[in-house]
Image (cartoon, grey):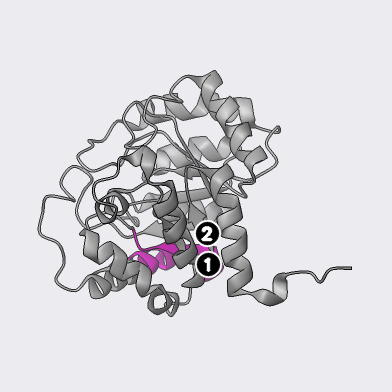
Amino acid sequence: MGVLNVTPDSFSDGGEYLDCAQAVARAFEIERAGADILDIGGQSTRPGSVGISAQEEIGRLIPVLEKLRGRLGIPVSIDTSKAEVAEAAILEGAEMINDVTGLRADRGLAAVAAKGKLPLILMHMRGEPSTMQTKPFARDVMRDVTTGLRESVAAARQAGVAPSQIILDPGIGFGKSTRQNFELLSRLPELARLGFPLLVGTSRKGFIGQALGGAAKQERAWGTAATITASILGGAHIVRLHDVAEMVQVARVADAIANPASIAPRK
């Protein structure tokens, strides 16, 4: 899953693709680089960020979606926690909903997914983006994440979302300490027991920089590659990342290690 942030303030690429033409060009670059899904977001959820209105979010997203509709060969996921935004994006061709709040912000998202029979990604976030890295971390991160994801699944199912539509994301970096992020990666098989496909997003995140002695976000590619490999070997079905061209080889080789039978024999 390739990331495209149409925002002025996302932690990694904020401001780079706020212009519609640049965002559209980047979307095609992500597709050519080998991504299977394009994830477009119009609101930053970096630590310390504050929310924006649905109308502002729609105003950033819809011009890009209009330009991509019918021209992109991979499905578009819309990264939003607002039902109104998701509905507008679906009308312009979005085929997946990615909710970083796990339905805590707007349970109406589940009804939108159920109505359209669309995949719904439910992520675990401890707290809110504005405060998630300043409030106390959970004493038991696995229990916290598992409990939170189960609550999100229950809310989705209550709204009519089929189990086959649900994808779970442990929310690496969202209200977790550096140690807890690595613990979650090492224990992904336990989360897989919840019975749903897993998405993991580690790309360029701060916990990687801390493990590398304070490396800047532009210097975390190899660290990101290690987390992608660990995620796939731990059972992740989707990895969400920025550096698609660089990470496609990492993902494909890790996939081959996880499933050697998938490699076609040489003729």
Residue 138 among magenta residues: no
- Looking at the rendered structure, the kind of residue marked 2 is Ile
**How many numbered marks does the figure carry?**
2
Report the residue at 49% width, 56% height from top: 239
Which of the 4 image quarters holds residue 45?
A: top left
SS at badge 1: loop
Q: Is residue 77 something one can see in this rendering?
A: no
Marking on residue 238? 2
Residue 153 among magenta residues: yes
Residue 91 image point, x, y percent = 57, 36
Residue assigned mark 1: 162
Q: Disc 1 to disc 2, how far (Cα)?
A: 19 Å
- Along the line of sight, the residue nearer the viewer: 95 or 129: 129
- Along the line of sight, the residue nearer the viewer: 96 or 255: 255
Q: Is residue 44 left or right of residue 139?
A: right
Residue 251 image point, x, y percent = 57, 58
